[in-house]
Amino acid sequence: MKRICMIFAAVMLAAVAVKADNKIASPDGKLVVDVAVEGGRPVYSVQYDGVTFLEKSPLGLNTNIGDFTKGMELAGDVQLREINNTYTLATIKKSHIDYHATEGTYTFVQDKKTIYDIVFRVSNNDVAFRYKMYPQGQTLCCVIKSEATGFVLPTGSTTFLCPQSLPMTGFARTAPSYETTYTADDAMGRNGWGAGYTFPCLFRNNDKGWVLISETGVSSLYCASRMIGHDNGLYTIGFPQQGEYNGNGTAEPGISLPGETPWRTITVGKTLAPIAETTVPYDVVEQLYEPTKKFTYGRGTWSWIIGMDQSMNYDEQKRYIDFSAALGYESLLVDALWDTQVGRDKVEELAAYAKQKNVGLFLWYNSNGYWNDAPQTPRNIMNNTIARRREMKWMQSIGIRGIKVDFFGSDKQQTIQLYEDILADANDYGILVIFHGCTLPRGWERMYPNFVASEAVLASENLHFSQGSCDAEAFNATLHPFIRNAVAAMDFGGSALNKYYNAKNEPRGSRRVTSDVFALAVAVLFQSSVQHFALAPNNLTDAPEWAIDFMKKVPTTWDDIKFIDGYPGRYIVMARRHGDKWYIAGVNAGKETLKLKLPLSMLPAGSEVKVYSDNAALEGSVKMQKLGKKQDLTVSIPCNGGVMIVN
């Protein structure tokens, strides 16, 4: 017994240590966070390999029980411990993660009273930190009026940011819904359209590397946040705008004490590899409930992206079930207006027919409610617990696989509660959930095991609605793997093989300017465990056979990821592994044909690979090639074209 106690004590000593200089370093020692107090105000800075990536940046909380951004002191030395976690997750960019980090807890006091801890976790390329607020006497709850939390980028840094919309704007007053356009390599010192920027936010630290800033672990216990731009490279945490949600609900989060804020995350790298490959949104969160079943994922089709509202009828949905079955796909998304244009009885028939074809149905729902004017039905179901659970019981009885819930338009704590309630109730009935017209998911794949993905991006519907979006398709595709899709699954709904966005594929409306190989590449570049592709039944006969064959086999779950080359807004080449098969995908948004020698060290020398590529006229072809002894391959990618390599 004495020996067991000694072993336990030794383990505890190894796990917890004290450091007097208030610095915390990653396991490899390269990433260092320095926490201090200057003039009573908490600050921190971040260096990587001796280079400053964040200069002294503010910390602190201003609450309705006190302003804890000033008059603060550090109480004692930082408490350090090692974090070593292993977990598996099928719905993110890597299925198996070994997370190693150093955790440092900094205790801050004001007037000799312990106010909060700031807990930092530093892994080899990621920093995550959050506040733990303590009770003050008999006060066991508080409202966070604002956060001083900020990020000061070095002078000369450039930005890759997406402006936050003003509340109750856009289609049917449904904004903000994270569907605005990015600017690339822009200057600092701006504040978007006046309301800041949506997470995640990418910065280039001159020629020294990259910084991706976001947040994770947002649940009903807090609100989601945005970034507010200031002068001198400062960006601070901003809470939702009061006008969101039609003015209902508070913009300021309330917490029970003791209580914790979400994690703010900072990913840094000399190259873009740590940005594209990061798993920090999932590393620092925990599963909030057990799944009620083993969920299945996969590919699907949907008629609406090509045929719009008029495609929502029984015969067309049945035709698309047959189409999904012909492709070997697992699902069909039945979009808006199914309740009035198909009818519930007929949806039950469709579900039974789909089951015979081994196809599961996803049903679309409007989230509101009273918070916007979106008229699409079904409405007034997902916003009410009684109606929602009654509906989900019906869905369970007819074998519905999942739901797509749309038109939220707010980051308030009250809205986050609705997201969580929908997810928790859907789990009770074994239903998967996709969100659209919505906020960025923040660690939700791990927190909520039936969560699939969110839109939160200017997605494929805009390709249908706007030729400008078609013209910018390649530009946006080269951004998402480094920004939006780097931190969460993205339900884009793309990879169209129609030349025109209409059911007859005839020359009218929006015209796709990207190649068929491009369509294959983004099926791999854009990560979501369920993908409803923008394919149409006519593609079985009018698209190249090699393209359809590829789309029949492309996976939607991945075991590993490797960034190979790229620059946001210009081009990207990235590899994903499913089982023992690697898919290396690339697209080019530059005006000139891109010639690259790709290092493919993940493949054995002499491997024979299948290469899908475009000529200058964006005509695709496929051929077999053998890797040389140096495990590299030279490729050419024209503007708006792609490359796809499969071993």
Image (cartoon, rainbow, N blue to C red):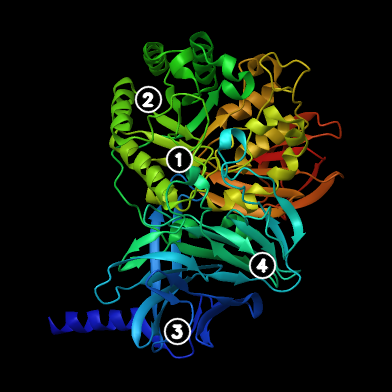
Question: How far across and how far down the image is residue 48, in percent?
Answer: 62, 75
Q: Give me the C-alpha separation between circle 4 and circle 1.
A: 35 Å
In the rendered image, is residue 602 in sight?
Answer: no
Q: Badge 3 is on which residue?
A: 72
Q: At 65% from the left edge and 38% from the top edge, which residue is drawn?
A: 522
Cβ atoms at labels 2 and 3 below 8 Å apart: no
Q: At 49% from the left edge and 66% from the top edge, which residue is drawn?
A: 146
Q: Badge 4 is on which residue?
A: 230
Question: How far across and how far down the image is residue 494, in percent?
Answer: 63, 32
The secondary structure type at the circle numbered 4 is loop
Cβ atoms at labels 2 and 1 below 8 Å apart: no
Q: Which mark is residue 452?
A: 1
In the rendered image, is residue 636 in sight?
Answer: yes
| Neighbours of disc 1 within 10 Å: few (<14), some (14-19), many (20+) | many
Which label's residue is closer to the chain start, 2 or 3? 3
Which label's residue is closer to the chain start, 4 or 3? 3
Q: Give me the C-alpha separation between circle 4 and circle 2.
A: 48 Å
Q: Which mark is residue 400?
A: 2
Side (left or right) of 118 relative to 611: left
